[in-house]
Amino acid sequence: MRHDHITSAKQLSRGDIERVLEHASDIADDPSAYADRHEEALLGLLFFEPSTRTKMSFAAAIKRLGGDVVDMGPVDASSVKKGESLADTVRVVEGYADALVLRHPSEGSAQMASEFVTVPLINAGDGAGQHPTQTLLDMYTIRENAGLDDLTIGIMGDLKYGRTVHSLAHALTNFDTRQHFISPETLKLPRNVRFDLHESGSTVKEHTKPGGILPSLDVLYVTRIQKERFPDESEYRAVAGEYQIDASTLTRADDDLTVMHPLPRVDEIAHDVDNTGHAAYFQQAHNGVPVRMALLDLVLGGEP
Amino acid sequence: MTDDRQLRVSKIENGTVIDHVPGGQALNVLAILDIDGTGGEVVSIGINVPSDRLGRKDVVKVEDRELSQPEVDVLSLIAPAATINIIREFDVVEKHRVERPDRVTGILQCPNQQCISTGDEPVDSEFDVLDDGVRCVYCDTITREDITAHILV
């Protein structure tokens, strides 16, 4: 890889993305061929916030490459509880591992931490900032289902605080895509992402309702709108209802529409969508393993 | 411009004249220089003075003071067309325009409270300078309005 540290999707070129996705595809075709690839490798897991999918799929990925994890464990049981800075924590843990995976509640934490270590550091989510490895598995899923060029994608929900949205929007600018952003007025894309999309010359449109644009979409990427973002529950319920989809909503969509979600979902995608041909969100979650195997193999020095 | 207009703000013997500040920004210039009157500095300001180049401009004259580079860097963010005149014995001995740096380090605080640079970490704040604002290199937050409110003192 050109980049030792993976801190933001902004740093990934089209070539970088394609290289990871193609390597992931080779791994998915024959995972056992990679089982001894990194036998001695240890991956340091530093999760300062809860995680199920990201943490477990990183652990599965390194183990399927023959390596293992060293896990900081919950923050409550670590030196962070004693007031240790993040800069110190990563400098200590890099001595125990060949690469680090960091999730942290502060935006820019991965960028800062990467300045203090020489082993590759991978951002697994920094507050409302970025989540580049989620984006790689999202791109992999889009490529499998709809292709990455000549793509019309709707990205819906909490666009302001959704880090998966920010990373995905950046990565998609490398491809021939039309991006439609669908959200309540108060949860529109943040200024910095809007600025970058504008600078990239991408085709970007914003909507407050999904209805009008739904029939033209190849992919609908749904994210959760969190209750905490609203002053009271009734306002949340009134707004969130507009951005929920079910099987009947999708009768107005193209038959080939792919519905994605970074998960966990609450009620923004009804369970009756699960058994339609549109649902790709579980496949998307499963893709986390081959994609993270590919990324780890590349940053740990494997040849694709 | 006539002598009469120039004399709206009197000449100073030694110090710095910051000219071609956008109209209405003089008080922000004083904030950048950390001048609030309590330090005893002698300061003259002209606000919304007619200007051929800017339409309206502000002029700030600070006696017995020259500006540091970080002060000039921040000044360039709110007054990109400003000129800085160093005065000694009533004569302009040096005159130059401010230059906008590509990056400013350690002089602004990120307004995003969730940004790692605002926490207790051993890093200085760092911003890329855009045409019309600044962007935190850590959290990417773009600040365009009210940059002076974020100056670290």
Image: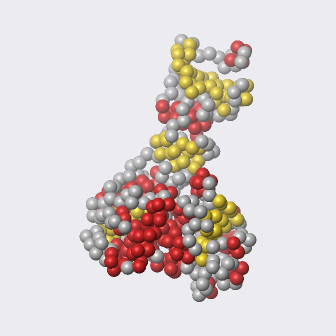
Which residue lies at the image location 46% right of the left edge and 51% below the top edge?
A: B117
Q: Position of residue B29 (x, y in %)?
A: 59, 32
Please say whether residue A225 is visible from this viewpoint: no
Is residue A289 toward the left or the right of residue A165 in the image?
A: left
Image quadrant containing the C terminus of chain A:
bottom left
Which residue lies at the image location 63% right of the left edge and 77% below the top edge?
A: A257
Please say whether residue A193 is visible from this viewpoint: yes
Q: Position of residue A126 (x, y in %)?
A: 47, 61
Is residue A109 toward the left or the right of residue B81 in the image?
A: left
Residue situated in front as seen by the camera: B21 or A1: A1
Q: Quadrant of residue B37?
A: top right
Q: Position of residue A215 (x, y in %)?
A: 70, 75
Q: In the orientation shown, which residue stands out farthest toward the left? A: A40
Which residue lies at the image location 64% right of the left edge and 64% below the top edge?
A: A178
A126 w.r.t. A275: above or below: above
A13 w.r.t. A153: above or below: above
Residue situated in front as seen by the camera: B123 or A97: A97
Residue situated in front as seen by the camera: B53 or A161: B53
Q: Quadrant of residue A40?
A: bottom left
Is residue A72 toward the left or the right of residue A145 in the image?
A: left
Which residue lies at the image location 69% right of the left edge and 78% below the top edge?
A: A253
Q: Position of residue A106 (x, y in %)?
A: 48, 59
Q: How many marks?
A: 0
Is residue B72 toward the left or the right of residue A252 in the image?
A: left
Image quadrant containing the N terminus of chain A:
bottom left
